[in-house]
């Protein structure tokens, strides 16, 4: 199976609906969007209801004839299948259809490969690609064997040896890349630990790809940070963000939290990729709050919500409080609904609803703040600087026995330094 190239190509997309899955139609639509993201034009669609996938050809013979007919009609040069295909399915389909055969996994890997910008993202994609290739080399070996004269000939042995070598080289490469990744991940974990120590709460933006997560992040960066060079990349395309970025957001009253922008999700995210991105998404697990950004202008937004929540579960993110930012309301007809319970309506690009969103975040992560007065002896100067950094100081007075602070601080700090509280 070849990688996709950038020049425009025409494809038929084909999918099996196993046991009448309710999300099937949508996953086909998503497949077409993924193809479009690779500059592939979708010329036709073939679907089949089955109770199990055909082991040798994924679909039934009759349906494959439909695929072939559509290919001829539209002069398509490839078929894209809606699931990850086994090595033998790829081989059989390639020889039967006599064209390029692509599956959902390689399509997503291609997009990720093209978009990856940081070294870590590039490494993760490369490892996922090699892991995808590895079992498929076996298939390649078998087909070569057939060409060179059938089972047990010496010729075949030679070819096999060469491929075994390639296989070993790929395994070695995976190991080397994983080692390099480990170093990068360890570095990030150290940073994370440091952050944990300072107890600054972490808020993570999560959601379906292209919902507007990075745009929300940038709106907050613009409002609440001084350095404007901290913007993240946002764009109207699938998987614009592949790496996690963290920004420090300091509100007017000095309350601070860390905001994390993350990779977007689609349904059936390839297994190897989910695994690879698990480390990137570890930040999300430490969050005190998730802001689930939803493209409310998309008619399929409810599916997107479901897919995101399922993916979060798959990567082990559970039991973290969540609020929803129903974004792109500028694209909806009618009045903007009032924020309610766990839903805030935003148009991040137009910077609408951002105050409400901050309000909702604030309510949840700073709920345990207490206002009090502390008298801190002059020999505890380091505590005064700590509180200046981690609490909201409302007033400072210098008295005979120490510094008197009127402040708003976290409950945990209050309990820790209760001996200095004056009442
Ligand atoms: N009309 C409108 N467009 C928006 C809004 N918010 C974001 N967009 C646009 O939607 C597109 C995607 O935005 P991103 O912020 O890159 O989306 P994302 O969720 O980070 O996407 P991935 O990183 O690919 O997962 C961009 O073209 C944004 O300009 C909004 O409130 N209204
Ligand atoms: Mg993004």
Image (tube, rainbow, N blue to C red):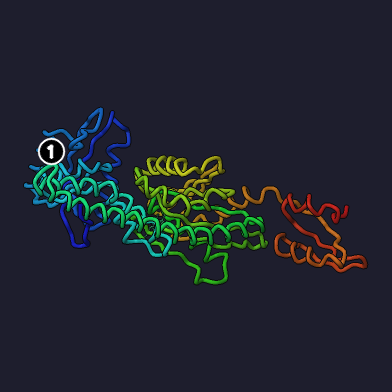
Front residue of this view, candidates 169 and 354: 169
Q: Quadrant of residue 8?
A: bottom left
Tell me which residue sits at (86%, 53%) in the image.
419
Q: Quadrant of residue 3?
A: bottom left
Front residue of this view, candidates 141 and 78: 141
Q: Is residue 121 left or right of residue 219?
A: left
Q: Is residue 287 left or right of residue 298?
A: right
x then y, percent, for residue 263: 42, 54
- Mark 1 element type: helix
Say if 357 sits above or below 14 in the image: below
x then y, percent, for residue 199: 66, 55
Badge 1 local density, few (<14 within 10 Å), some, or many (20+)? some
Q: Residue furthest front?
A: 154
Q: Which residue position is annotated with label 1?
A: 64
x then y, percent, for residue 167: 28, 53
Tell me which residue sits at (66%, 57%) in the image.
197
Q: Is residue 333 visible?
A: no
Q: Is residue 288 visible?
A: yes
Q: Is residue 356 left or right of residue 29?
A: right
Q: Residue furthest right?
A: 400
Tell me which residue sits at (27%, 56%) in the image.
37
x then y, percent, for residue 334: 41, 48
Front residue of this view, candidates 149 and 188: 149
Say if 181 sits above or below 287 in the image: below
């Amino acid at each position: 199976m070849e990688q996709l190239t950038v020049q425009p190509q025409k494809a038929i997309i084909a999918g099996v609906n196993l046991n009448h899955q309710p999300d099937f139609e949508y996953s086909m639509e998503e497949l077409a969007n993924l193809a479009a993201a690779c500059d592939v034009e979708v010329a036709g669609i073939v679907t089949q209801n089955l109770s199990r996938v055909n082991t040798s050809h994924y679909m039934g013979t009759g349906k494959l004839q439909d695929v072939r007919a559509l290919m001829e009609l539209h002069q398509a040069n490839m078929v894209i299948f809606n699931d990850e295909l086994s090595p033998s399915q790829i081989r059989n389909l390639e020889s039967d259809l006599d064209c390029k055969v692509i599956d959902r996994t390689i399509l997503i890997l291609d997009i990720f490969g093209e978009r990856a910008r940081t070294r870590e993202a590039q490494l993760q994609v490369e490892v996922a690609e090699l892991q995808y290739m590895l079992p498929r080399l076996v298939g390649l070996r078998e087909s070569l064997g057939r060409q060179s004269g059938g089972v047990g000939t010496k010729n075949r042995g030679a070819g096999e040896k060469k491929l075994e070598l390639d296989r070993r080289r790929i395994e070695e490469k995976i190991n080397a890349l994983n080692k390099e990744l480990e170093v990068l991940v360890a570095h990030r974990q150290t940073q994370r630990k440091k952050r944990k120590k300072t107890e600054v709460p972490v808020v993570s933006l999560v959601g379906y790809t292209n919902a507007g997560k990075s745009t929300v992040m940038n709106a907050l960066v613009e409002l609440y940070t001084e350095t404007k060079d901290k913007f993240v990349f946002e764009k109207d395309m699938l998987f614009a963000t592949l790496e996690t970025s963290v920004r420090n957001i300091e509100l007017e009253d000095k309350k601070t939290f860390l905001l994390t922008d993350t990779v977007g999700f689609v349904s059936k995210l390839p297994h190897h990729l989910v695994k690879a991105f698990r480390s990137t998404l570890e930040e999300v697990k430490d969050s005190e709050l998730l802001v689930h950004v939803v493209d409310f202008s998309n008619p399929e937004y409810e599916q997107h919500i479901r897919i995101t929540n399922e993916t979060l579960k798959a990567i082990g993110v559970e039991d973290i409080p969540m609020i929803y930012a129903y974004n792109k309301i500028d694209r909806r007809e009618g009045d903007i609904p009032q924020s309610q319970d766990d839903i805030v309506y935003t148009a991040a690009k137009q910077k609408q609803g951002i105050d409400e969103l901050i309000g909702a975040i604030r309510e949840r992560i700073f709920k345990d703040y207490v206002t009090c007065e502390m008298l801190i002896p002059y020999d505890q100067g380091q505590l005064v600087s700590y509180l200046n950094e981690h609490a909201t100081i409302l007033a400072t007075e210098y008295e005979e026995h120490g510094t008197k602070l009127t402040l708003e601080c976290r409950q945990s700090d209050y309990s820790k330094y209760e001996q200095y509280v004056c009442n």
